[in-house]
Image: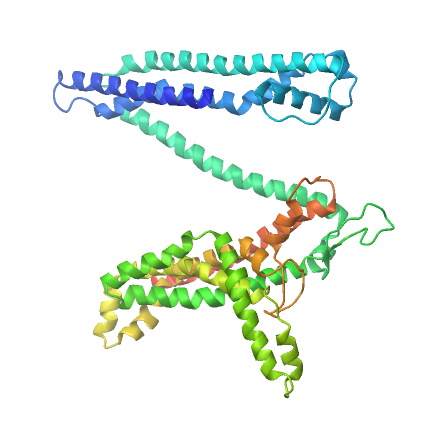
């Protein structure tokens, strides 16, 4: 709470320094020859505000992010004799309970008595003092640095001071920091996946993982129990993932693309203004709502339809097919794929519509002037010219379908099965990753580490799809630029 108050105070302080700096620049500009003032008054105010607020804000944020670690390190610096006698795990629990007691949060259920009770009360009081010392120390340091920045920047305001260049330099540094953060985040994600996957592949052969057809990641406690080694063949998971993805794209691609063609080339402005926002509403519906819709509405409708069809076929030449259809249940790949396709329609439609609207009108006019009909113009001119953007929209929809979890969990089941039958229950890679990492897990068993193997494999496959799509985009972009 104190951190937020300090940041709010710094924000108000920076606003005040901006006003002071701008006022001084305006006053000086009125006393010199017009045009001789290098930078506008707003740049001078921004320069003063940056020096007064930004370093102080960095100090407060650093204390908020690292204060807990500093407190924990200082708390462990002088352990009591009773605590030193505990095991390392017991010491960790003790210090966590001391900090929880100091901060008013929930501690473990460990009961301390005797010297340990006295020690934890003393450490809790010390933790409270350390927390206050770090917070108020950071606040005092922020005040000192802010005033020092104001004292440094305010006197520099003058006709020849290049405040615009300095402010733009700060902005360039900010943009560079954002870019570096994005790159480091990507590197960190890939690095963590590679490291944990390497630990997993030390226990499970990559060949068995990539080409195995049995997925049963249950590790028994004793060697004589069933599935003591587990089964980590990922083929069923990727088969289910791509089966549902293909069904979803068979629904989303034609409906979304045809909707985009209608909105871009045929609809009048009034119709477009009504239909496009209604389509984009689908993108804002939470996936759990789609999951409920699939499980409670679409699933029963599909089951009754197939059961009714099966009842008609029983006793005829297709008796075996009728028996199979009469046993179809609510959860199936077809239900998950169909509902997921509905969810993906706005991704395809909205992006494709924007891309087709970006095609120069001169191409349409030239085609129509040569005697082509509107449909021929769309087919032979607009769609080829917009193909790179359409491919990007399709790729976005594919990536969204591969990463979907909630709809699959509620509508397709959790059974790992290698099948191309849309009426079977299947599971996907993302669902299994969530299942494996749900709850309290120890990251030292193949069962838990297999989630990282799945994540790395899925990352590589989607990366390959991205490269292929980019090559297609570049090819057609060169052709129609």
Q: x, y (%) of residue 436?
A: 66, 48
Q: x, y (%) of residue 280?
A: 37, 56
Which colour style is shown?
rainbow
Residue that extends furthest to the right in the rendered view of this protein: 224
Q: x, y (%) of residue 413?
A: 62, 59
Q: Is residue 132 above or below residue 244?
A: above
Q: Nearer the viewer, residue 44 or 237?
A: 237
Residue in the picture at 48% in, 39% down: 182
Residue in the picture at 17% in, 16% down: 28
Q: x, y (%) of residue 185?
A: 52, 38
For the image, the number of numbered tags is 0
Q: Nearer the viewer, residue 142 or 22?
A: 142
Residue in the picture at 47% in, 67% down: 251
Horizontal arrangement in the rendering, residue 271 relative to residue 300 (left or right):
left
Q: Is residue 118 above or below residue 469?
A: above
Horizontal arrangement in the rendering, residue 414 relative to residue 251 (left or right):
right
Residue that extends furthest to the bottom in the rendered view of this protein: 317
Q: Is residue 469 above or below residue 374?
A: above
Q: Quadrant of residue 147?
A: top left
Horizontal arrangement in the rendering, residue 343 relative to residue 480 (left or right):
right
The answer to whether one can see residue 375 in this image is yes
Q: Nearer the viewer, residue 411 or 401?
A: 411
Q: Quadrant of residue 49?
A: top left
The answer to whether one can see residue 354 in this image is no
Q: Quick one: quadrant of the C terminus? A: bottom left
């Amino acid at each position: 709470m104190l951190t937020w108050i300090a940041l709010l105070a710094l924000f108000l302080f920076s606003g005040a320094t901006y006003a002071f700096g701008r006022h001084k620049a305006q006053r000086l500009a009125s006393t010199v020859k017009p045009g001789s003032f290098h930078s506008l008054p707003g740049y001078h105010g921004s320069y003063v505000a940056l020096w007064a607020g930004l370093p102080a804000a960095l100090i407060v944020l650093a204390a908020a992010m690292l204060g807990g670690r500093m407190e924990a390190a200082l708390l462990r610096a002088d352990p009591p004799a009773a605590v030193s006698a505990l095991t390392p795990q017991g010491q960790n629990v003790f210090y966590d309970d001391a900090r929880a007691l100091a901060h008013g949060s929930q501690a473990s259920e460990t009961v301390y008595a005797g010297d340990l009770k006295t020690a934890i009360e003393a450490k809790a009081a010390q933790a409270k003092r350390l927390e206050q010392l770090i917070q108020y120390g950071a606040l005092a340091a922020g005040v000192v640095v802010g005033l020092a920045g104001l004292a440094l920047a305010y006197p520099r305001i003058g006709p020849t001071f290049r405040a615009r260049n300095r402010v733009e330099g700060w902005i360039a540094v900010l943009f560079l920091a954002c870019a570096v953060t994005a790159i480091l985040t990507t590197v960190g994600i890939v690095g963590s996946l590679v490291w944990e996957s390497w630990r997993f592949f030390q226990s499970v052969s990559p060949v068995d993982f990539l080409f195995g057809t049995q997925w049963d990641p249950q590790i028994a406690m004793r060697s004589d129990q069933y599935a003591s080694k587990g089964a980590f063949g990922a083929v069923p998971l990727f088969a289910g993932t791509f089966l549902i993805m293909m069904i979803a794209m068979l629904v989303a691609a034609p409906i979304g693309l045809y909707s985009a063609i209608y909105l871009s080339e045929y609809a009048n402005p009034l119709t477009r203004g009504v239909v496009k926002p209604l389509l984009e509403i689908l993108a804002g519906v939470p996936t759990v709502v789609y999951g409920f819709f699939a499980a409670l509405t679409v699933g029963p409708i599909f089951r009754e339809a197939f059961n009714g069809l099966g009842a008609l076929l029983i006793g005829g030449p297709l008796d075996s097919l009728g028996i199979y259809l009469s046993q179809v249940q609510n959860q199936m790949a077809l239900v998950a794929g169909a509902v997921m396709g509905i969810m993906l329609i706005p991704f395809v439609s909205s992006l494709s519509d924007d891309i087709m609207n970006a095609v120069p009108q001169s191409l349409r006019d030239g085609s129509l002037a040569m005697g082509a009909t509107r449909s021929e113009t769309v087919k032979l001119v607009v769609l080829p010219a917009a193909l790179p953007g359409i491919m990007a929209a399709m790729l976005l929809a594919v990536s969204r379908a591969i990463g979907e979890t909630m709809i699959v969990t509620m509508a397709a089941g959790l059974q790992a099965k290698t099948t191309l039958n849309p009426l079977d229950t299947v599971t996907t890679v993302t669902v299994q990753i969530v299942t494996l990492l749900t709850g309290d897990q120890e990251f030292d068993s193949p069962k838990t580490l297999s989630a990282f193997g799945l994540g790395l494999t899925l990352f590589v496959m989607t990366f390959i799809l991205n490269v292929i799509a980019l090559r297609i985009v570049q090819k057609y972009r060169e052709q129609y630029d």
